[in-house]
Image (tube, rainbow, N blue to C red):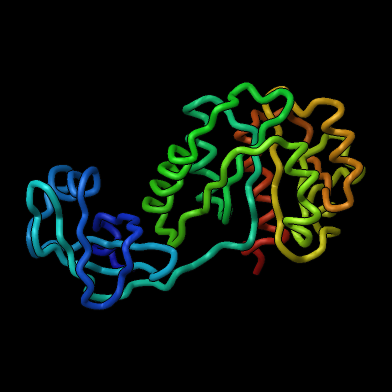
Amino acid sequence: MTRALHRMPRLFVPQPLSAGREVRLQGEQAHYLRNVMRLREGDAARLFNAGDGEWLCTIEEAGKRQVRLRCAEKLAEPALPPDIDYLFAPLKSARLDYIAQKATEMGARRIRPVLTRHTVVRKVKPERIRANAIEAAEQCNLVFVPEVLNAQPLERLLADWPEQEPERRIIHLDEAAPIADPIEALKQVPEGPLAVLIGPEGGFAPEEQRLLRSLAFVHSIRIGPRIMRADTAGVAALALVQAVLGDWRA
């Protein structure tokens, strides 16, 4: 990508994108292009979504109520990451935003909040998670945005898993995992769709740990000798999974 393209404003849009198609932006996106980036008629911006890829678009109108653009050239095809879900116990606001951003950057295809016994934050706004995921995708040149699912209690999720996700294996962080080396442990996980499960700051309750350890579709790994915050542990776990089972492999 040329430096000129790299410097152009880049926005996710849900509208269809194709050669010659007109796209109208309003609200915050129009304000951003017109008043923050100070774009005018004839200037260019990059628009993308997970269905149509990324497009170079030219501004035809930069009015007070809307910015109207037209798709000129396709820059990139959609690029879905590996089929990895990120399951996590919600944290407080700023750290929740961080989780959404980093899960997106690390290549999670879906973000799924899970309510555990020790979860402090019980009410989660999917729209806030999605807004942070979109921002991360825009800034990191990703041509996809992860799907954000509603929060679900852990026990119900695990009870429904064999029927709803029969092929998807769960990678669970467990300091008592039988194999100390996380890379060796991950090499024993069958190829296929995955989920990475991160517990709350206080850890899983004993009964939750017993349940997780009893399930054949759950694979436990350790992530080193140091205690990590939940949001840090999530990034570390996703990095390991991507390196061994994801798209970081040569």
Residue at 46% in and 55% down: 145
For the C terminus, the quadrant is: bottom right
Front-most of 81 and 243? 81
Quarter of the image where one finds residue 81: bottom right
Residue 22 lies, in percent from the top left, at 20, 68
Front-most of 250 and 88? 88
Residue 123 lies, in percent from the top left, at 55, 28
For the N terminus, the quadrant is: bottom left
Residue 65 lies, in percent from the top left, at 11, 48
**Marker count (numbered):** 0
Front-most of 246 and 125? 125
User: In the rendered image of this protein, does residue 98 appear above or below residue 27?
Assistant: above
Quarter of the image where one finds residue 226: top right
Horizontal arrangement in the rendering, residue 242 relative to residue 4 (left or right): right
Residue at 25% in and 54% down: 9
User: In the rendered image of this protein, does residue 166 appear above or below residue 135?
Assistant: below
Residue 34 lies, in percent from the top left, at 13, 48
Front-most of 230 and 236? 230
Residue at 51% in and 49% down: 104
Residue at 49% in and 67% down: 79
User: In the rendered image of this protein, does residue 246 appear above or below residue 147?
Assistant: below
Horizontal arrangement in the rendering, residue 19 relative to residue 78 (left or right): left
